[in-house]
Amino acid sequence: MGSNPQENKAATRGAADTGAAQTKPPEPHKAVGQAGPSGADAPGGQAAVEPGAYGPDAAEHAALLGEIGPLPLRGTAWPTLIKIMAWAVLILVGMQITLVATGPHRHDVSPVAAVVVLVCFLALLIVARFMLMSETRITQDGIEQSWIRPRRIAWDDILFVRYIPMLTSKRLICFSRSGRPVVFQAGTRELRAAFARIAQVYRRR
């Protein structure tokens, strides 16, 4: 009996596929402990932070706390000159409001404008009061500052920091591992020196 041409073609195609499968090189196996996806390939598209990529190790951190001095180190968050200037401006604004409220043209002032000015003045009064009382502390656990909403960050949560020596205040901006910045102010020489040293140790590497 003669062979069917369709059967011959199917047999030839099957032999070709079998030969290709045999000659295909095996896929390399992934090494045990090899790192998984990172960066843009990580779940959620966020770069994974590797431990030790930023900040000091345990020995450097212990040396840093030793250099800062006996802990807790505390001091006023705002320089004395800045606090005096803030209260001087607040007193001048209050005097101006009093003069307008008791002057002959007080009836010409819009009630809405008067309420807005009064609310702004009360807000400035609250900020000035917290500037006067605010205190920054460096402890074994981290950094904290009393404010309208207390600020604090643990050493283990610090990714890296930036020290900003502004004219009005000396600021330490701590970026947490979640990406949230926490700002602290230093009003004393000891705190400013500690902030500068922390910025050197916890710099981005």
Image (tube, rainbow, N blue to C red):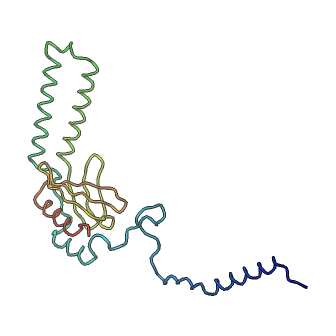
Number of numbered tags placed on the structure image: 0
Is 169 in front, or is 144?
Answer: 169
What is the quadrant of the C terminus in the image? bottom left
**Residue at the image position 85 percent from the left and 83 percent from the top:** 3
Seen as rendered, the residue at the extreme front is: 2
**Residue at the image position 24 percent from the left and 62 percent from the top:** 161
Is 200 in front, or is 75?
Answer: 200
Seen as rendered, the residue at the extreme left is: 81
Q: Quadrant of residue 94?
A: top left
Position above or below: 156 against 98: below
**Residue at the image position 46 percent from the left and 66 percent from the top:** 42
Position above or below: 205 against 4: above
- In the image, is 115 to the left or to the right of 132? right
Counting from the top left corner in percent of width and height, residue 149 is at 30, 48
Counting from the top left corner in percent of width and height, residue 141 is at 29, 66
Is 66 in front, or is 23?
Answer: 23
Position above or below: 196 against 108: below
- In the image, is 27 to the left or to the right of 116? right
**Residue at the image position 14 percent from the left and 60 percent from the top:** 192
Counting from the top left corner in percent of width and height, residue 48 is at 41, 67
Q: Quadrant of residue 92?
A: top left
